[in-house]
Image: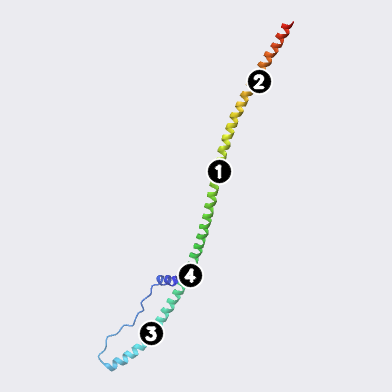
Amino acid sequence: MRFQDAINRAMPRKNQKRPEKKPAEPSKSSLVLKSDVSKIVDQEASTAPMRVQEQLLDDETKALQVELTSLLDAVQETETKMIEMSALNHLMSTHVLQQAQQIQYLYDQAVEATNNVERGNKELSQAIQRNSSSRTFLLLFFFVLTFSVLFLDWYNN
């Protein structure tokens, strides 16, 4: 139904020419003969161009139908492609959203790992300080112990 409407809109109807009436002549018998002869001649003369016009209009209508059919096919193909593109766009946006969530998760893990590394560095620096202070304490302890043993040995002798 839409196709026929499109054809009707695209092809406006032309008004067919009707033979014009000639003014009546005074003599009735000559009028009848002349009008009969002129009607036959007019009908034969007007039917040939009318047939040619009708054939031209039919050919033009068929050409327009073919053109409109090809345009309809192109529009339907374009519509199909647009639907496919819409589906692909939806799929892509879904994947982008998933990737954004994964990126956020990885970012959170990287921040947590950075915090863990910073805390580990603090622990290592504290361990190094403890190790150096314990080394100093042990060195001092052995030094005092050595002098204590020497003092006791001297005192005993």
Q: Is residue 47 above or below residue 97?
A: below
The circle drawn on residue 45 is: 3
Residue positioned most to the left: 26
Q: Residue at x 67, y 17 (%)?
A: 139
Which residue does the numbered mark 4 point to in the structure image? 69
Q: Residue at x 32, y 89 (%)?
A: 35
Q: Residue at x 73, y 6 (%)?
A: 156
Q: CA distance from mark 3 to mark 4?
A: 36 Å
Q: Earlier in the sequence, mark 2 or mark 1?
A: 1
Q: Earlier in the sequence, mark 1 or mark 3?
A: 3
Secondary element under disc 4, as helix, strand or loop, is helix
On the image, the x and y values in percent for residue 48 come to 41, 83
- Asked whether 96 or 2 is in front, the reply is 96
Q: CA distance from mark 4 to mark 2?
A: 97 Å
Q: Earlier in the sequence, mark 2 or mark 3?
A: 3
Which residue does the numbered mark 2 point to in the structure image? 135
On the image, the x and y values in percent for residue 130 come to 62, 23
Which residue does the numbered mark 1 point to in the structure image? 105
Secondary element under disc 2, as helix, strand or loop, is helix
Residue positioned most to the right: 157
Q: Nearer the viewer, mark 3 or mark 4?
A: 4
Name the kind of residue labelled 2 in the image: Arg
Quarter of the figure with the N terminus: bottom left
Name the kind of residue labelled 3 in the image: Ala
Q: CA distance from mark 4 to mark 1?
A: 54 Å
Name the kind of residue labelled 4 in the image: Thr
Q: Nearer the viewer, mark 4 or mark 1?
A: 1
Q: Crowding near pointer 2: few (<14 within 10 Å), some, many (20+)?
A: few
Secondary element under disc 3, as helix, strand or loop, is helix
